[in-house]
Amino acid sequence: MAVENEYAIETQDLVKIYKTGKVKAVDGLNLKIRKGEIYALIGANGSGKTTSINMITGALFPTSGTIKVLDQEIPKNRRLITNYIGVAPQDYSIYFDLSLEENVRFFSRLYGMKKAEYEPRCKELMKILRLEEKRKALTKNLSGGMKRRTSIACALIHSPKIVFFDEATVGVDPVLRTFFWEYFRSLKEKGVTLVITSHVMDEAEKADRIGLMRAGKMIAEGSPEELKKQHNAETIEEIFIKLSEGVVVDE
Amino acid sequence: MSKESQIEFLPKNPAFSFRRTLAIAFKTINQFRRDRRTLVLLTIVPVITMLVFGLALGGEVNNVPIVVENNDLLYSGFNLGNNITSVLENDSRVNIDFTTTYTEGIDFVENGKFYASILIPANFSQNLVHMLAFGNVTPSFYIYIDATKPTVRASVLGAIREAVEESIGEKGINLVQTLAHEGAEFTGLDVGIPAIIAFELIFLLVIVGVITVTREKIQGTQDRLYATPLRSSERLLGYVIGLLLIATIMVTVILIFGIFVFGAKVRGNAFLLIFAALLFGLAHVFMSVFLANFAQNELQAIQFAPLTAIPSMALGGLLIPVVGLPLWLQPFSYIIPLTYGINLFEGIMLKGWGFKELWLDFTVVAGMCLIFFVLAVISVKNRMRD
């Protein structure tokens, strides 16, 4: 269960301006993600979700602001947390010319896992993610949904404490999406913190808390129920539209 | 900071992990193992190139540095030695040093500073006059010549023959040729092979290297790698091990073809040759990691191969020896790795040179390795900041 006031991730006044293009991709983001919660970062394409995640995982240097993950300052101490975080990026981000199993094994080696640790863990993940039959197949020959699950397996192989799923459920059929959310819940029950980004508003309903992002800024934050009550709206989408009025998007 | 104890930060991330490095190396090799067609193409192409270049490497070159010692004495009003040298002097194919003696010149030919040393003996005019009058002697002069470069040799001999004909109008002169490097004499095909190996290493490693790194970007795996314990140094070294292994196999195939099919010769130490190939390859692996920075997709990545190969080919001594290039172009030759690569491969394969003669080329290639290594590390690190 989510722990009040104990944060897995904290950012303060986080800003990112890419060298190419002067737009603030992330503009003063203050995030507090509790340990053991499912947090959904919702926003349209280009709202700064992926940039934020990349800064939090240490893959990208912020222009200004501070980030703390598991109480470690990022990017300064990013090497201390790498074993505790898992990332399934927006693109499948797997090696298409390797087999499913080779992909997972490659990432396990980067985490320094020994064969004895890796084998049972890989078996477990293959079973949960229903990938057993295709483990020898080249990932380029897999369906989109399977590629997505391979990507998730690579992110989870080292049993991380925080997992980032960037647009994990995009292009996934409803049955599989339901399955994903069930699986996310089960991870949460094991004490894993999940950060999920999506541009699909109704996805957010299933999260413990939601952050709505627009043009690099957080425009609303809270649990789905809280937000709906607060803004007197039926759906998250409605809230988003309401809040977006008057905010000029600088594309 | 008080909560630090809640998660045990195990000393799981050593400063450098060979395991992670090998993971990258295996992955790189595995990826190319799956892409056999590319590998076969990249191996067959050099074999064909070898043949084509070998056969086409005829012709002559300009500005070949040679030594001429003219000791000819005036005889019955003739000094034919002087006549010959003055014609030679105006021949653009050769560049004559008159201040060095024939014997000194021999040493310079052996160490590659000059390509031929010529001695016109004191009795040359006398013998010539006697030949014309009595036909009882044949005037000779002596050439100590580097025969490992057919184009260079053709230029020197062509210039001399013309000079003799023009100044004397006679063909009965005996040119006593001694071949440098223990008599090593090569045809265009022999000569093509070391240069092609050097060239092919560049072509191959730049393609394979840039693609490997660019693929990480395209497939999005780069972002994922940044979030793992993998360090940029490990990543770089992993690529290097993987790519060098691929390169070694391919160079071996090229060498086997060269030696057993085309009859190329390796006069020097085979291990030194492999070491030279690896060092030269290393510089290009680092270079390609650096270049990969500027490619957004595989199509762009492939363009880097001709982009590096064509100037190298033109200026590095593949087609025309560096000394034969226009003077203003020569400085550019000395900043191109292929120039030194060809020196190394030709030195070891054709001339039987060792480290003693080639230390400078080895040093320069090692220095280039270091420069590209630094650039590669900087570029790998920088990607996190833009």
Image (spheres, coloured by chain):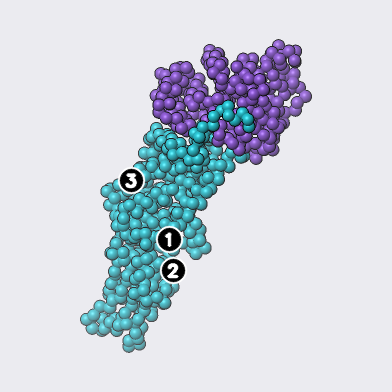
Residue holding disc 2 = B92
Work out whether B19 lies above or below A219.
below
Query: Tag on residue B252?
Result: 3
Query: Tag on residue B360?
Result: 1
Query: Tag on residue A206?
Result: none
Q: Is residue B93 visible?
A: no
Q: Name the residue furthest right.
A: A246
Residue B211 screen position, x and y as percent:
47, 39
Q: Badge 1, how many Cα within 10 Å: few under 14, some, many 20+?
A: few
**Is B288 or B358 nearer to us in this picture?**
B358
Residue under mark 3: which chain is it in? B
Residue B52 screen position, x and y as percent:
36, 50
The amino acid at mark 3 is Thr
**Is B119 or A133 nearer to us in this picture?**
A133
Q: Badge 3, how many Cα within 10 Å: few under 14, some, many 20+?
A: some
Residue at the location (50% across, 42% down)? B233
Q: Secondary structure at mark 1?
A: helix
Give the mark nearest the N terminus, 1 or 3.
Answer: 3
| The color chain B is rendered in | cyan
The amino acid at mark 1 is Leu
Q: Name the residue furthest bottom.
A: B76
**Is B66 or A206 nearer to us in this picture?**
A206
Please state, as top left, top right, bottom left or bottom right, where the C terminus of chain A lies in the image.
top right
Residue A49 screen position, x and y as percent:
64, 27
The amino acid at mark 2 is Ser
Q: Secondary structure at mark 2?
A: loop
Q: Is residue B159 left or right of residue A95?
A: left
